[in-house]
Image (cartoon, rainbow, N blue to C red):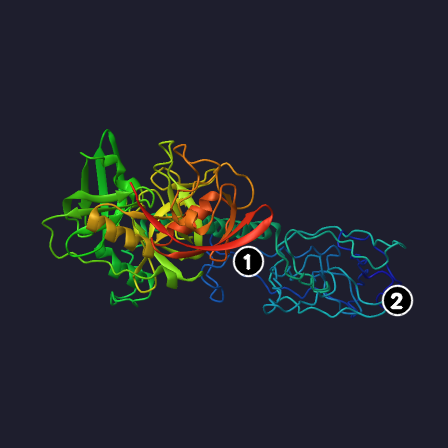
Amino acid sequence: MNEGKPGPPGEGPTARPEGPDGDFELARPDRADTGDAHEGDYELDRPLRAEAAPADVPPAPDPSRTPGAPEAPAARPAPADPAGTGQAQPLHDPDPYSTPPYGEPGPWAPAPPVQHPAATPAHGMAVTAPPPAGSTAPHGTAPAPAPAAPPIPAQAHPEAPAAPYADSPAAPYADTTAPDPWRRYDPWAVAASAAPLQQSGHEKQRRGRTRRALLGAVLVFGLVCGGLGGIVGAYLERNGGVGAIELPQAGRESSDRDPDSVAGIAAQALPSVVTLHVNGSGEGGTGTGFVLDTRGHILTNDHVVAPAGDAGEITVTFHSGDTAEATLVGRDSGYDLAVVKVKGVRGLTPLPLGNSDNVQVGDPVVAIGAPFDLAGTVTSGIISAKERPITAGGEKGDGSDVSYVDALQTDAPINPGNSGGPLLDSRARAVGINSAIRSAGSGADRDGGQAGSIGLGFAIPINQGKRVAEELIDTGRATHPVIGITLDMNYGGDGARVGTEGSDGGPPVTTGGPGDKAGIRAGDVITEVDGQRVHSGEELIVKTRAHRPGDRLELTLERDGEERRISLVLGSSEGG
């Protein structure tokens, strides 16, 4: 540090080896005996010493020292006087710049360590980093001096040799001083800049673990909530909710219905409809009937009561649930009608009868019966067709049980057990007697079999039923209108052809009968009845039986290729 500095007057610059701290010890000037004044630092004359105090007397305490503070080290003895002048010698070489001694023995000692706390920025504010520690000021500019440490009576550290000045061209201004583990205060050193606050690796790891723990807790909470929600939902679904469920429901309403509605028609007709159970000759069956008058006459089908025979039993069950035994009044297989009568029953409600001639295709109808012994079954439909010629029966093989009906066709479902039940119009009046159905794969059969409805049901017109019922009640037998001819039922052409001989071997045209009187001959083909085309012998019989005995018919026939028209009055024959 003192290299190249001028010495005292009369002396040249001195050079001393460089110490470990970079300071150079100046050469001590030779003192003259003359005692001339000399620039520099000299040790002052020490005061005269008093006699030594006794050894057993302790030194007096220093009143300026703080209690509990460590005592200052003892001062080093003054250097000896080599010249023997008896005058105190200076501690350092003269310094024309009055530079305070540093690193050398003297009254100064290193100051205690000084901490430089870094300013803590506000949250979210950036910190401007000061220049790095150890950086030097620009060339030619002296560094800002640091505050001097207070003087200490004695130096706490021994003298250390100064290190040579490192003059490196690669880093001329670099600070090569090793960091001081004792953190001694250097007044010329630039204050170490505080580095910006940074999160340590341990802090980042701690925060990462915290985030992961929070995320895991949220996931676990969500899974637990989802599981609980599923369990609660399943419980509510199985048990119908937390409490009892009360579904919305309409209030009680009046049971009255419009008279022309299905419900209104059924309400009026059901008290007059009965169910028949027939047993006899090892056979049995179930059918339906309806009350004709207050005397207990009930109309039904012939095939319903046929199993009873002459000694069978017929039981009638009314809509109220009451039952009564019935007896056969009369039956006719050609019309498939029968009348039975109950005795000892009061309060019967006869069913009103309509007029089948007033019925039109498309009119609404209601059928009531006991299909498969289900009493009081109500179905509805319309009139699908009128004057539909059908034949039913024929189980005996001789044709005596074949019925010929000019029927009303309906799509109201009719099933086994509906036989004999009423077919009602919109005013709850009987316009027909349910008799037969056409099943898939079969012809028109009486519905006493086990086939089901396919929407093709047939009913005997009530006009015909009324006439037959009256005859059966009055005489026990019904009469059939006849022409007095025998038909060839095997004829395959269009129309009904008169046979060549009668059924009993006699002539095909009964002598003196209606046909004989009208001029009908064997081999004639009848093609029309009252202007309506007939295509077979069955149709001619059906058209004829739709009339009463004594009615006049207009017939059209062909003979030898010529068409002729004739008129006749129907005769009568007893049925069986």
Query: How far from the left and from the top, in percent, is residue 202?
Result: 58, 49
Q: Which amino acid does label 1 sit on?
A: Ala
Query: How far from the left and from the top, in percent, is residue 124?
Result: 61, 68
Q: Distance between the residues labelled 1 and 2?
A: 40 Å
Judge left or right: residue 190 versus residue 204: right
Establish if 509 lies above or below 78.
Answer: above
Which mark, by number, is residue 87? none
View extreme (top): residue: 282
Q: Which amino acid does label 2 sit on?
A: Gly
Q: Residue at x 55, y 39 (%)?
A: 492
Query: How far from the left and from the top, in percent, is residue 291?
Result: 21, 54
- Asked whether the viewer can see residue 57, the reply is no
The residue identified by callout 1 is 72
Helix, strand or loop at mark 1: loop
- Asked whether the viewer can see residue 93, the reply is yes
Which mark, by number, is residue 10? 2
Judge left or right: residue 186 versus residue 219: right
Q: Which residue is drawn at 66% across and 69% down?
A: 147
